[in-house]
Image (cartoon, coloured by chain):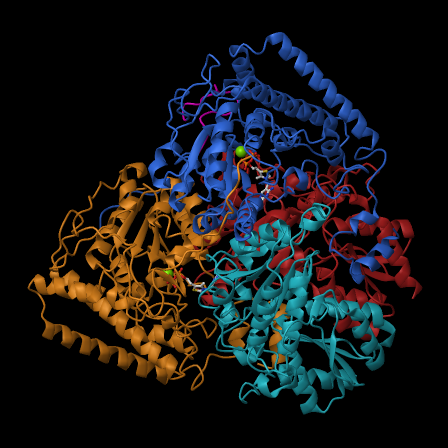
Chain colours: A red, B cyan, C orange, D blue
Amino acid sequence: MPRRTMVEAIRDALDVMMARDPRVVVFGEDVGYFGGVFRCTEGLQRKYGASRCFDAPISETGIIGVAVGMGAYGLRPVAEIQFADYMYPGYDQIVSEAARLRYRSAGEFTAPMVVRMPCGGGIFGGQTHSQSPEALFTHVAGLKTVIPSNPYDAKGLLIAAIEDDDPVIFLEPKRVYNGPFNGHHDQPIVPWARHPLGETPDGHYAIPLGQAAVRREGAAVTVLAYGTMVHVAEAAAEETGVDAEIIDLRSLVPLDVETIVRSVMKTGRCVILHEATRTSGFGAELSAQVQERCFHHLEAPILRVTGWDTPYPHAQEWDYFPGPDRVGRALRAVLEE
Amino acid sequence: MPRRTMVEAIRDALDVMMARDPRVVVFGEDVGYFGGVFRCTEGLQRKYGASRCFDAPISETGIIGVAVGMGAYGLRPVAEIQFADYMYPGYDQIVSEAARLRYRSAGEFTAPMVVRMPCGGGIFGGQTHSQSPEALFTHVAGLKTVIPSNPYDAKGLLIAAIEDDDPVIFLEPKRVYNGPFNGHHDQPIVPWARHPLGETPDGHYAIPLGQAAVRREGAAVTVLAYGTMVHVAEAAAEETGVDAEIIDLRSLVPLDVETIVRSVMKTGRCVILHEATRTSGFGAELSAQVQERCFHHLEAPILRVTGWDTPYPHAQEWDYFPGPDRVGRALRAVLEE
Amino acid sequence: MAERIPLSLHVPEPAVRPGGRPDFQYLSIPQAGAVRRPPVDVPAHEIHDLAYSIIRVLNREGEAVGPWDPGLDAEAVKAGLRAMLKTRAFDARMMMAQRQGKTSFYMPSTGEEAVACGFQTALEKGDMNFPTYRQQGLLIAQDWPLVDMMCQVFSNERDRLMGRQLPVLYSAKEAGFFSVSGNLTTQFVQAVGWAMASAISGDTRIAAAWVGEGSTAESDFHAALVFASVYRPPVILNVVNNQWAISAFQGIAGGESATFAARAHGYGIPSLRVDGNDFLAVHAASSWAAERARRNLGATLIEWVTYRAGAHSTSDDPSRYRPKEESDAWPLGDPIERLKNHLIALGAWSEERHTQLRAEIEDEVLAAAREAEGYGTLHDGPKPSSAAMFEGVYKEMPRHLREQRQELGV
Amino acid sequence: MAERIPLSLHVPEPAVRPGGRPDFQYLSIPQAGAVRRPPVDVPAHEIHDLAYSIIRVLNREGEAVGPWDPGLDAEAVKAGLRAMLKTRAFDARMMMAQRQGKTSFYMPSTGEEAVACGFQTALEKGDMNFPTYRQQGLLIAQDWPLVDMMCQVFSNERDRLMGRQLPVLYSAKEAGFFSVSGNLTTQFVQAVGWAMASAISGDTRIAAAWVGEGSTAESDFHAALVFASVYRPPVILNVVNNQWAISAFQGIAGGESATFAARAHGYGIPSLRVDGNDFLAVHAASSWAAERARRNLGATLIEWVTYRAGAHSTSDDPSRYRPKEESDAWPLGDPIERLKNHLIALGAWSEERHTQLRAEIEDEVLAAAREAEGYGTLHDGPKPSSAAMFEGVYKEMPRHLREQRQELGV
Ligand SMILES: Cc1ncc(C[n+]2csc(CCOP(=O)(O)OP(=O)(O)O)c2C)c(N)n1
Ligand SMILES: Cc1ncc(C[n+]2csc(CCOP(=O)(O)OP(=O)(O)O)c2C)c(N)n1
Ligand SMILES: [Mg+2]
Ligand SMILES: [Mg+2]
């Protein structure tokens, strides 16, 4: 089966969908001729023409706003926000418009659209190229929020997102674009070409939104993770020898509560990981739900290992990033209870 | 002691601070000559002149953006966003700028400013005059988020917010502007003039940010609430006869963890209330922290009573609003565990 | 270094406040017929002057004059008159209904009826308006059922929006009327996106964006102009300058310094400034812009100069911030009166027929209101279901909403 | 209904792409000295033509000509030349340092040095710039210590920003240099706010806002113009049109349809369009705008026409989207060469002295780099403390951050 990096997998998903469905249009800053600063749209303008893949002015509100209009018309816009850190000027159009259009018009108008945005840290990008704003989307009724951790999922989830009739926020953990970074920044990363999840079938396949994947079975503790943190969790489990069950959520809304609950019922312990700032991060919601649903099965407090409640610093990248050591400590801590 | 409505208390706080500190300037949509759509700034332009209290163009990003510049200059801007539902176009300036200016400039530049915004439901305002976006602020490092539930606190907290050297989001639950609405929409509300917390001393007083208030002592269950929901909690406790300890958080960041933990250690049970949508609401953070800090004292799952994960509807206002019946059911439910 | 004079802040103030004498000197009004009519393919920079004048057709005698006279026949004029009268009567009835507690909120378009009613005549089936809350005239001019609109205002069981939306935030796809948002100006750039989609699809349909002059200050106004300037999609960008944005006069949006029509120039977009109380001018300018759009010549911005004669909404009391007499002193007059006089001047109308038409329309509106009230009002009678609150957040209801619906027990 | 022709989307494309021959025909360049110089209190609408021309002082012979000739003496010109040379040398050294792994990222201003270096000469102590990442010249022109800037670029132990910020996002309050944001255009409206604060306070200081032409599409550009139009604060609104925004040519920001200087017209703000590679023109236009601001006449927008000769940043490879030769073909030339020729024409300079000055400056920059590297580079040597990561989020560290610091154990 062909091996792809996550960038290639995303590009392939766009290619497949543009070929299948003339309603799919792709645009954003630098995405046209140049193919995007992360090269995710390379070649698409040449293949499908400038009116289906084009550069947008540097206006995130404009990009999302016109996507809403296009969706209402009947197209399937896929907009790229160059970094998730830059989505804020478009946040009103996401929250007040895309998310509520179906509801407020009782289904007369809808906003089937995908907003792709590279997110997360680990690239020395400083406070404006490292953010993980997923919780700002999960709080908003009407949005779906998806975040793949590998090329196979990236392609299948992106195709599902484009086919979805609701607006989908599609977060791309850029640190794993080229390989499954596990937080050991001093070690070379394995490229996706040598990782089983780099295998991505050609053509069309979709991974339904709302289904988590169990990346590693275990009996001692459930680890809830997504994006880059899935790989960090795997490293931490391996290095500590803790018999952790690692769940890659893949979709935050809708959330695969069944898989989570089944696992925590089994392990009685839960550690939640994310890169975003802790306070009001998505980990809080996961923690709240796990204790609501599994209270009588819990044998230790649910722990969160997250980014600190500071802006993402530049020089202190590895003090900020919740790497395998911090995760490992948490795994041990919940077992000691 | 003089009695004031919450509107009057807020106006008085602004008046006191404008008189004491020439750096305080007040502006926003309709706040100048007219005195604000909720009348919170009435008379201030006449008293302090148009260059200290003025109308702003309808641009929330402009309002927050110029406030950041004014703060950096050395003024103490107090900006009004007409409804919290309309803050989204200014969200980038809040999150990316006001919240991070001190940090990123290592203290060379700061954004001492207050952004006031009426929030919450209960007024048949539909989806764009009823929102409670507090969690979108609490997730952001560098912001303080405050929400009073009564005139006394509103004045004292607003003065503290204006004196604070960091940016403060000051949420005003508009449903209690004129009286302590407890969710019984079919009953007349007591005006603040007949409520002890309508008593607001003249002149200057400040309530430190980060201190919760225990509104009702109790031994059976801890209720965490803020804004309008404090009054709903009181009604529910009274009507169910549950011996609830009701904590009015007043400030969400910084959070008075001590008071919360002390109470839950005592009661072993906790119910969390807010009007905002449930998923990733501030209740999730409270729930996560309570279980992290009080795990071994908890005798029942922590419950959340919140707005539903839908846009705020118009006709179904009272199905949406988490009123005393729903709160009462939760109080009973945690006791039955 | 030279001694410096202290700086000071300019804070715009309207010419008068309550108690003062209405003063519209800031508005310079050319004679009807005085402004030239360029061909629709004129380059933007050749018509900059049109952003600083006012296109007018109806003169004081009620005659249609000058190059913008669309030459409408009496039947078309009558249809316009009827639409405006109906809009006014509808507004009056709904204002009253709100005062009677039948709904929570209402927003009239009184004094501005010619803008929406006239504009709609330039559109075709399939075109899409992205309106604000003050373009009910677009629906009424198409004879959209009043009962349907009223059921939305009353949030009753027949409300097609299932009680979810604030009154007046209609949605009527079939009528080319996009779901109105409570957030200002978001629709302006969405209209540009819709028009881009039409162009991408090789379609022939055009879009119309709407915004109030106060709301031009919002970000999405700029985004719309930037995208319209870059991609030249088939869209008409309407700015309704009714002089007021709640309590703020147009100077607070920058109207002291330049016209809103002139905003287009920096983007290379042609613009017109038009007497919005002159039904014929509205029809003519709209048709000009629509023709540009249909011929793939791109966007046109139109500033409609009008006056918000009523309150901003039922929550507003304009006498607190402007003289009560201002409305009567508005120099462009009342759009209904002016069109009536034109029809009389054409010899096709009389005061008697006018009175009769008004009565007919009032009856029609009253009957519609009675019918709509029969389906319930906000606090009385049949209601949209509670379960409807959980539906339509997504196409399919996800688990967490099913659980929440169960929790509510509906 | 007439048969309709299918619509189509216009997607702007630059005249050439890699492999093609550079083509700047879209830029019409007047003779140096050809544009009039109005008094500073001219009303905005009387100088609309200045937004469509280009103010230039230096002619092909290196002479300063026309009404905008600021008549700078040789010493002032030399200071400007030195500042530009130093900026260029600084950029070259930091680009190299990044390639050597001493930092993560760098952004040069090569080819645009005259804009920032020339502009700074119009400011006074206490005035405040709100720059982008490409105005390092504002600091260097003030002889701000290169070591200090480099320590920021290296995120080392002497980095005044404690390692928190991406390289080049300097902050230097003392030098009137506002903390640079990684989020585009936010500073543009903040500058307006700062200027409003100065006016509210009866101060005499003025602000300068900076933005790239690509970033004018952002919301805060509009917000800045609206607020500047309404309150008339003392601010200069600089748009640096270096033709490119990463891979997007200026047409993607609307530059095909009108000039960026013209954007000001719709807001009633006077604007100038200026040869940004002509140090004398930069000085003259900046001084004109600063004078307006200081005399409480309000804002001025200036479009600086220049060219981004280098890569967008160390992450960029411009040969993928534009011809390599484009930079040399840029019709407004190189700002350093042009000012050097002027100084030679003045009889105050020679090629030899120039070569010598360059060598001196390169030594100075190299010495600074050595010193800065001694304080550490991103991955090597002394670093800002880990604890610094938790400080300064708030004025006082709240409990939850104290707990988190303990959790990290620092
Ligand atoms: C984003 C946003 N900010 C503020 C408001 C509150 N608001 C509603 S209408 C209005 C005034 C709009 O004035 P204008 O654009 O002139 O339209 P008009 O009401 O005159 O038709 C304001 C400030 C809002 N609805 N949305
Ligand atoms: C809000 C936001 N969106 C996108 C970016 C990514 N970005 C950084 S620089 C840049 C191009 C800016 O071009 P221009 O304004 O012309 O300035 P120049 O780089 O040419 O000086 C982009 C898109 C950003 N930093 N912030
Ligand atoms: Mg208006
Ligand atoms: Mg540029």
Whether residue D278 appears in this view of the structure is: no
**Left or right: A240 with respect to C314?**
right
Which one is in front, B214 or D316?
Answer: B214
Provide the major secondary structure of the magenta segment.
Answer: loop
Q: Residue at x 47, y 41 (%)?
A: D295
Quarter of the image for the C terminus of chain B: give it: bottom right
Which one is in front, C9 or D129?
Answer: C9
The location of residue A82, given as percent across then percent down, is: 60, 43
Q: Residue at x 65, y 29 (%)?
A: D140
For residue D21: magenta?
yes
Q: Quadrant of residue A330?
A: bottom right
For residue C227: magenta?
no
Which one is in front, C389 or A76?
Answer: C389
Quarter of the image for the N terminus of chain B: give it: bottom right
- In this picture, is C63 found above or below D12? below
- State the extent of the magenta-drawn residues as a range: D11-26
Direction left: furthest residue: C347
The location of residue B222, given as percent across then percent down, is: 77, 80
The location of residue B105, given as percent across then percent down, is: 70, 45
